[in-house]
Image: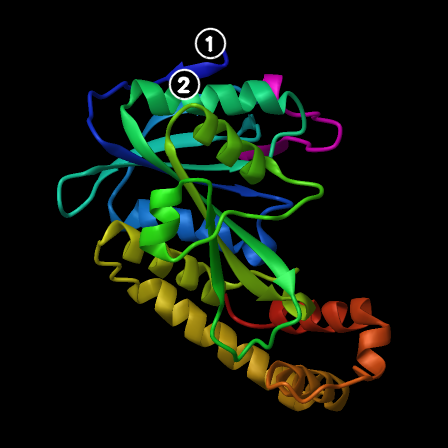
Amino acid sequence: MQHLQWIEQPIVHDAIFLAAFTGWNDAGDAASEAVKYLTRRFEGKLIATIDPEYFYDFASLRPNVRLEGDERHIDWPTNEVRIAELDDGRSLITMVGIEPRLRWQTFAKTLTTIASELNVKTAITLGALLTDTHHQAPVEVIGASSNKIVNRDEGLEQSSYEGPTGIVGVLNESFHSKGFTSLSFWAKVPSYIGHSPSPKAALALAKRTADFLSITLGATDLQIAANNYEQQLDALVASDPNLSQYADQILEYEAGQAADEIGEMADNPQEMIDELERFLRQQDE
């Protein structure tokens, strides 16, 4: 595959493949940030890239130009594959990429080829979706697998979803059809903050992955970011009566106290999202 560019092709056995993609599958950047954290946590090093020329429409996903001194450089969309060693000696292959615009079947075949050549046994994909949940509530992580043994051991169910899917759904089916143990974890992100990064949901996905792999997370920086995130949202909600009312009604709904009317903000959710984004842009990084 000429679009697969190996930098180094290590010899490993019984490896785990972990992937997430920005875009449709990544509400609040939670899935991609979870994989990035685990890659940092275990000091993953770059071993392969996938040429973006085959999989992206650059008119809709444009490259960026930047200056380094007097030199101009073009940064193209990247899909990077890294390898790390877990505390117990197992190899963790991670990939953080951008959902492709073109040739999804070829893209999926490329990833299963990488997994095969690196002797991967288990493939895990992460995703995040927008739901009507409160930002103070514990993040719910749902899992799905087509493997009956995994479902039994992890208390998961085979997905019964029917409808449009993203690259994560395509990859899960591709890995399963090729004989890999394939499963996916998804975090629920509050719909009224879905356009802002959610380190709290990223932390929940990282923890769920760590639990499945029986590894120690040690998520100090991610935990700090999650705490700061919740404090910022608390301040925003407290400062806005309409948003506070809407958030309270979500809590009532989640508690089973049916709310027939969601309030004025529910009729114009974009106003609420715009206000939240303005608030977060004013905060320190």
Residue tagged 1 = 1
Is disc 2 surrounded by few (<14), some (14 to 19) or many (20+) residues within 10 Å?
Answer: some
| Quadrant of res 178 | top left
Dot 1 falls on a residue whose secondary structure is: loop
Position of 94 with respect to 43 (left or right) is right
Residue placed at 26% from the left, 59% from the top? 217
In reply to whether residue 55 is colored magenta, the answer given is yes
Q: Which residue is mark 2?
A: 113
Q: Main secondary structure of the magenta part?
A: loop
User: Mark on residue 28?
Assistant: none
Which coloring applies here? rainbow
Q: Which residue is rendered at x = 45% and y = 25% of the image?
A: 111
What x and y, as percent, mark residue 176? 45, 31
Residues in magenta, as a range? 53-67
Type of amino acid at the residue the image marks with label 1: Met
Q: Residue at x 38, y 58 (%)?
A: 155
- 269 vs 49, left or right, is right
Q: Quadrant of residue 135?
A: bottom right
